[in-house]
Amino acid sequence: VGNVGAEEAISWLEAPRHPQTQAALEALRQRHGKTVGHAGKIVDAAFSGELLATKDAKCMRLWRARDGTLLRVVSACPGDGVAFAPNGQNIATGSVKLSRVQIWGPAGGSAVGCGKTKITHGKA
């Protein structure tokens, strides 16, 4: 993920959300409850068409949108935002206000590590 700069990743966090993000989040909440397993309030969500990322103040959860299967829990990613890259291959987490962002990228050729491999990240 070294090929993605902080400015680019912050632009993902600032971009309008996918029009189906709220509906995907509501479907997930119906299946898993209001917090969908987060310790705190969900502060942001991003939908890629296949994946849904939910974010509380300290961690991100990555879900398969079609059936609500939890794919990954990523801790130690503070901030109030989450967004997919336009190509769907990376996720940014962090805070636009603080200009702090972490970039999570593909691992083992799977979309953002959704296969049997770990999500990789880099700090921009």
Image (tube, rainbow, N blue to C red):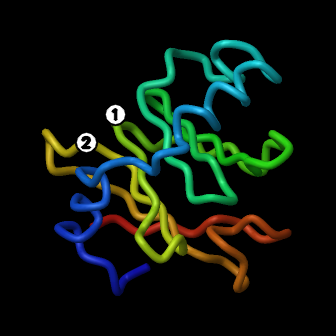
**Eyeballing the image, is 70 above or below 89?**
above
- Cα separation between marks 2 and 1: 6 Å
Q: Tell me which label, 2 or 1, sits earlier in the chain.
A: 1
* Quarter of the rendering occupied by the N terminus: bottom left
Quarter of the image where one finds residue 9: bottom left
Amino acid under disc 2: Ser
What residue is drawn where x is 23% and y is 71%? Answer: 8
Q: Point out which mark residue 80 bears.
A: 1
Amino acid under disc 1: Asp
- Where is residue 20? Give x, y as percent: 55, 44
Q: Is residue 28 left or right of residue 42?
A: right
**Eyeballing the image, is 82 above or below 78?**
below
What residue is drawn where x is 79% and y is 42%? Answer: 70
Label 1 near label 2: C-beta < 8 Å?
yes
Circle 2 residue: 95
Q: Secondary structure at mark 2?
A: strand
Q: Secondary structure at mark 1?
A: loop
Number of labels in the image equals 2
- Where is residue 79? Give x, y as percent: 34, 37
**Eyeballing the image, is 62 above or below 113?**
above
Quarter of the image where one finds residue 111: bottom right
In front here: 58 or 97? 97
What residue is drawn where x is 42% and y is 53%? Answer: 83
- Where is residue 112? Give x, y as percent: 62, 68
What residue is drawn where x is 42% and y is 26%? Answer: 43
Q: Point out which mark residue 55 bears.
A: none
Q: Is residue 26 left or right of residue 95?
A: right
In front here: 9 or 14? 14
